[in-house]
C-alpha cells in the first residue's frame, strides 16, 4: 500500500514508521530541519526496546511531488488541519482514504468540509510519542493503538483492508462499533488530562496522587461526559471511572502535547480541546464551568504564542 503521513510529528511519525518497517511504500510529508534530517538519516524512532530507523520511499514538503496515494494519515495539529486539507489534495485519487489522528472530535468533519466526505474515515490514536530533535521521535509508553471506521459506522471493505495493513505491521488497530463514541471517549481523557496538566504544570503521577487535583480531574471528566451525552453520543455509564483507570495506568511522568506546548510558549490545541468542550457545551445548553476556567486561564498564553497578544514571559 502507498501511504503518506501528512505531518510527521509524534503520532504520525510513529505509526508511519511501523508501516514503513513492514514494507509499505511510505511517504513522509514534513518540513524544515525535521525534513532534512529524515532525508539524511531516515526517521529514527526511540523506544524502550531500542531504536528503529526507517528510510521512507520519499520525504518531501511538496505533496504534488508524491502524487496520489492509497492512505493519508493526517498527523498535523488540530489548528493546522484546514490548511493541511487544502494542501493534501494532490495526494488523493478516486479510492484514497484519509484518516485523521488529531485529538478532539472535530477533525473528520473539518477534513470532509474541504475534501468532501468520500475519502474521510473517523480516526484516533493512542501513543506517548513526540519529536525530540529533527528526524527523531521518542515513544515512551506501552500504549500504541490506532482506531478508525466509517463515520456512519457501516462495515466497509476499505476499513477492513486498513486493519489488515496495520496488523501486518504489528500495530494494534481496531474498528470500533461506534467511531463517534470512540472519539468522545478519548476526547474526555485528553481534554481533562491536558487541561488540568496545563493548569497545574504537573505530570500525571502528581495530578492523580493529590486528592484535590484528582477530584478536579474527575469533575472535568463529568462535565465533558455531560456534554457528549447531551449531543447524543452513547457514552457508557462507566466512562468517568474508565478514564480514571486509564489515567492510573499511565507512566507517572506522562504529560500531554497541550501541556508541553503551552509551557514552551508554542501554539497549542487549546481551542480543539478545552475550548471545544466549552463551545459544544454552550451549543447543547450544558454548563462547563471547570473547562471554562481552564480555557480562559490558558488563553493569554495561547494568544501570545500566536502573536496576537504581547506580555513578558
Image (tube, grey):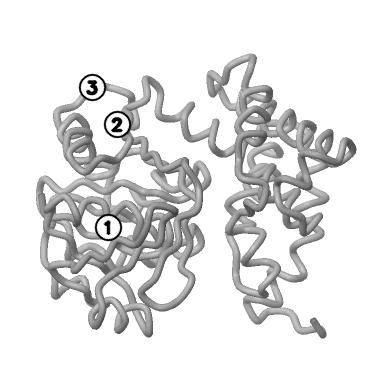
9 vs 141, left or right, is left
Q: Nearer the viewer, residue 140 or 6?
A: 140
How many residues crowd around disc 1 within 10 Å: few (fewer than 14), some, or many (20 or more)?
Answer: many
For label 1, the SS is helix
Q: On screen, 112 above or below 160?
A: below
Residue drawn at (46%, 41%), measured in percent from left and top? Answer: 143
Disc number placed over residue 155 in the picture, else none = 3
Q: Nearer the viewer, residue 41 or 78?
A: 41
Residue 213 at x, y percent in the picture: 84, 41
Q: Earlier in the sequence, mark 2 or mark 1?
A: 1
Residue 97 at x, y percent in the picture: 21, 46
Residue drawn at (54%, 36%), measured in percent from left and top? Answer: 186
How many residues crowd around disc 2 within 10 Å: few (fewer than 14), some, or many (20 or more)?
Answer: many
Q: On screen, 48 above or below 172?
A: below
80 vs 311, left or right, is left
Residue drawn at (36%, 35%), measured in percent from left and top? Answer: 147
Total number of numbered discs in the rendering: 3
How many residues crowd around disc 3 within 10 Å: few (fewer than 14), some, or many (20 or more)?
Answer: few
Q: CA distance from mark 3 to mark 1?
A: 27 Å
Q: Badge 1 is on which residue?
A: 17
> In front of the other: label 2 or label 1?
1
Residues at circles 3 and 2 in contact by the CB criterion of under 8 Å:
yes
Residue drawn at (23%, 22%), measured in percent from left and top? Answer: 155
Q: Earlier in the sequence, mark 3 or mark 2?
A: 2
Q: Residue furthest top?
A: 237
For label 3, the SS is loop
Q: Earlier in the sequence, mark 3 or mark 1?
A: 1
Q: Badge 2 is on which residue?
A: 150
For label 2, the SS is loop
Residue 205 at x, y percent in the picture: 72, 45
Amino acid at each position: 500500500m502507498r501511504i503518506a503521513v501528512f505531518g510527521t510529528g509524534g503520532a504520525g511519525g510513529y505509526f508511519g514508521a511501523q508501516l514503513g518497517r513492514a514494507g509499505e511504500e511510505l511517504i513522509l510529508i514534513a518540513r524544515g530541519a525535521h525534513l532534512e534530517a529524515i532525508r539524511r538519516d531516515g526517521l529514527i524512532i526511540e523506544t524502550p526496546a531500542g531504536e528503529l530507523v526507517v528510510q521512507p520511499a520519499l520525504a518531501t514538503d511538496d505533496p504534488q511531488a508524491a502524487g496520489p496515494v492509497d492512505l493519508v494519515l493526517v498527523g498535523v495539529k488540530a489548528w493546522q488541519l484546514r490548511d493541511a486539507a487544502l494542501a493534501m489534495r494532490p495526494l488523493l485519487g478516486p479510492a484514497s482514504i484519509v484518516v485523521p489522528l488529531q485529538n478532539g472530535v472535530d477533525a473528520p468533519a473539518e477534513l470532509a468540509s474541504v475534501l468532501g466526505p468520500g475519502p474521510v474515515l473517523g480516526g484516533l490514536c493512542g501513543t506517548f510519542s513526540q519529536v525530540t530533535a529533527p528526524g527523531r521521535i521518542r515513544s515512551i509508553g506501552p500504549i500504541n493503538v490506532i482506531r478508525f471506521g466509517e463515520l456512519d459506522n457501516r462495515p466497509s471493505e476499505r476499513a477492513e483492508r486498513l486493519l489488515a495493513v496495520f496488523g501486518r505491521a504489528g500495530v494494534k488497530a481496531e474498528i470500533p462499533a461506534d467511531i463517534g463514541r470512540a472519539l468522545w471517549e478519548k476526547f474526555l481523557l485528553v481534554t481533562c488530562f491536558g487541561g488540568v496538566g496545563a493548569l497545574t504544570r504537573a505530570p500525571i503521577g502528581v495530578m492523580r496522587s493529590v486528592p484535590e487535583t484528582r477530584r478536579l480531574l474527575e469533575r472535568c471528566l463529568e462535565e465533558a461526559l455531560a456534554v457528549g451525552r447531551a449531543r447524543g453520543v452513547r457514552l457508557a455509564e462507566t466512562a468517568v471511572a474508565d478514564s480514571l483507570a486509564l489515567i492510573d495506568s499511565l507512566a507517572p511522568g506522562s504529560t500531554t502535547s497541550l501541556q508541553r506546548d503551552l509551557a514552551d510558549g508554542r501554539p497549542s490545541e487549546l481551542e480543539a480541546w478545552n475550548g471545544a468542550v466549552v463551545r459544544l457545551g454552550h451549543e447543547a445548553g450544558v454548563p462547563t464551568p471547570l473547562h471554562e476556567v481552564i480555557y480562559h486561564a490558558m488563553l493569554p498564553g495561547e494568544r501570545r504564542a500566536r502573536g496576537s497578544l504581547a506580555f513578558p514571559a
